[in-house]
Amino acid sequence: MSIDLYTWTTPNGRKVSIMLEELGLDYTVHPINIGKDEQFAPDFLAISPNNKIPAIVDSDGPKTMPFPLFESGAILIYLAEKTGKLIPEDNIARYRCLEWLMWQMGGFGPMLGQAHHFRRFAKERVPYAIERYTNETKRLYNVLDRRLGEVEYLAGEAYTIADIATFPWAARHEWHGVDLPDFPNVERWYKTLAARPAVEKGMRIPESR
């Protein structure tokens, strides 16, 4: 199996590069520089109809046909199910994994992304927006901290795609105005994941290629 990965240096992009490194799959990186609007190129649109990274093309997809796929959560589930790795087989653990993956996709991603925008990139400071999204970000860190005070990893006792999806966003905690020692369970989890070779390597994609 060979995977073409279309990505950039964002938390969502790094979810998939970490996943590919964890699985040990062969893949080719195609940088899509979103700062230069390369995501709007017609060739990329054919792969990712929403003009967003990441996207993949699996040369050995269903029915042994090339298979394009966009949306980071969908890609993680696809690769996990294709390989039988990093998603639990047990029904309860599987649904816990998907539950926390959806939590990341619906909250600990979009809300942190808004915090990034208004705290760092907005052309003018909007105090209401900064306060709103910073407060929501800290609320979500509290949710994460409570969960990780109960279990070792988000789905329970096993490292899964839920952790892979969440880590690259937590890696920008300084952008969020968050001190990890204020969330000791998150800090413990974060250091554990950061020490994984596949996470370290995946977080450097596409710069290292």
Image (tube, rainbow, N blue to C red):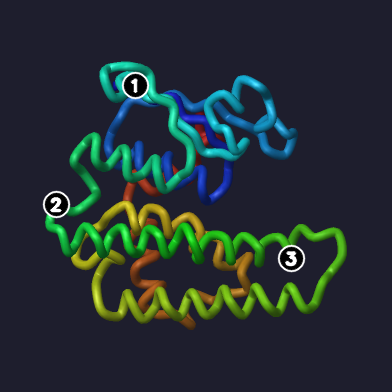
Q: Which residue is mark 1?
A: 2
Q: Amino acid at mark 2?
A: Glu
Q: Amino acid at mark 1?
A: Ser
Q: Which residue is mark 3?
A: 118
Is 193 or 107 nearer to us in this picture?
Answer: 107
Residue lying farthest left? Answer: 90
CB contact under 8 Å: marks 1 and 2: no
Q: Earlier in the sequence, mark 1 or mark 2?
A: 1
Q: Amino acid at mark 3?
A: Phe
Question: Residue 164's spot in the image, x, y percent?
Answer: 37, 53
Q: Is residue 166 above or below residue 145?
A: above
Q: Earlier in the sequence, mark 3 or mark 2?
A: 2
The answer for how far apart the CA atoms under marks 1 and 2 are is 25 Å
Is 99 or 120 nearer to us in this picture?
Answer: 99
Question: Residue 178's spot in the image, x, y percent?
Answer: 57, 75
Q: Which mark is residue 205?
A: none
SS of the residue under disc 1: strand
The answer for how far apart the CA atoms under marks 3 and 2 are is 40 Å
Label count reads 3
SS of the residue under disc 3: helix
Q: Which residue is mark 2?
A: 89
SS of the residue under disc 2: loop
Which callout, 1 or 2, points to the residue nearer the camera? 2
Q: Which quadrant of the figure contains the N terminus?
A: top left
* Residue name at image x 73 percent, y 67 percent: 119
Q: Is residue 151 above or below residue 7?
A: below
Q: Earlier in the sequence, mark 1 or mark 3?
A: 1
The answer for how far apart the CA atoms under marks 1 and 3 are is 39 Å
